[in-house]
Amino acid sequence: MKSRFFAAAGAVAMAAASQAVLVMDQLGPNFTFTNTGGINASQDFELANNAFDVAIIDDFTVSGSTLQLNQVQAGIGCYGGTTPLHSNITAYRIEIYSSIAAATASLVGNMGSQTVAAGSVTTDLTGYTPSATQPRARVTIPINIVLGGAGTYWIGVIPVFNFGGGAGFGQSGIIASTYAGSPLGSNAWQVNPAGGFGIPGNAANRAFN
């Protein structure tokens, strides 16, 4: 794809003024590098399970002054529950942080935050092997987040997905990528500010893209 950009297994496209700029790509060609990678929990749960709200985040660096982020693509998957379908995701949160510590303190991005309804998101199963128990897809999410200046930021893509639902919808996550991509590093982190998963310090280096 021309425009990508995320991390853990996603990509995001950013535009500065009227010129589109690719600032991050870890999905890989034809998404083959994310079709078989593990699904790592990234999810905004229902109120009863807020302690488990969790995100996979990864870093990107930009130069220049004001930059407008206009699109995110990510490899996502669902698992567990009786109906783990992408159609049960109601929205996607795009959160931008200044640091890992900021994400550990709160899943609401301190540098940018936007929730996009699922109806505005394009879901593409092309290149993914369909599975009733662990369906995967590429999602393209339109956003409008303005960054104030040059520097290194961290981004998380968090599906809003009920664990209980009436039918046991299960969990959602970002797919780990083995594609080297840009930037390099294999340094995605998983953060769980409320501590429901018992991750030491509520943050862990997952060592993938």
Image: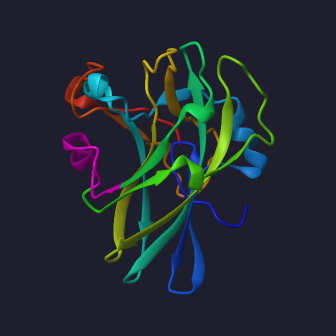
The image shows residue 154, relative to residue 166, as above or below, that is below
The residue located at (27%, 53%) in the rendering is 99
Q: Can residue 73 be seen in this view?
A: no
Q: Is residue 101 magenta?
A: yes
Q: Is residue 57 above or below residue 195?
A: below
Residue 90: image x %, image y %? Answer: 50, 40
Q: Along the line of sight, which residue is nearer the eye, 133 or 192?
A: 133
Which residue is rendered at x = 43% and y = 27% of the image? 162
Instruction: Count every numbered label the image shows and give the total.
Output: 0
Residue 11 coordinates in the image, percent (x, y):
58, 54
Looking at this rendering, what residue extends furthest in the front direction?
166
- Give percent across and percent down for residue 68: 45, 75
Q: Which quadrant is home to the N terminus? A: bottom right
Magenta highlight on residue 4: no
Residue shown at 40% from the left, 83% from the top? 64
Q: Dividing the picture into quarters, in which one does residue 41 lie? A: top left
Q: Give the x, y percent position of residue 175.
A: 58, 35
Q: Which of 98 and 128 is in front in this view?
A: 128
The part of the chain drawn in magenta is: 96-109
Q: Which colour scheme is used?
A: rainbow
- 126 with respect to 176 (left or right): right
Compared to 120, does 178 lie above or below? above
Image vertical order of residue 78 relative to residue 208, above or below: above
- Which residue occupies 23% across, 34% down? 193
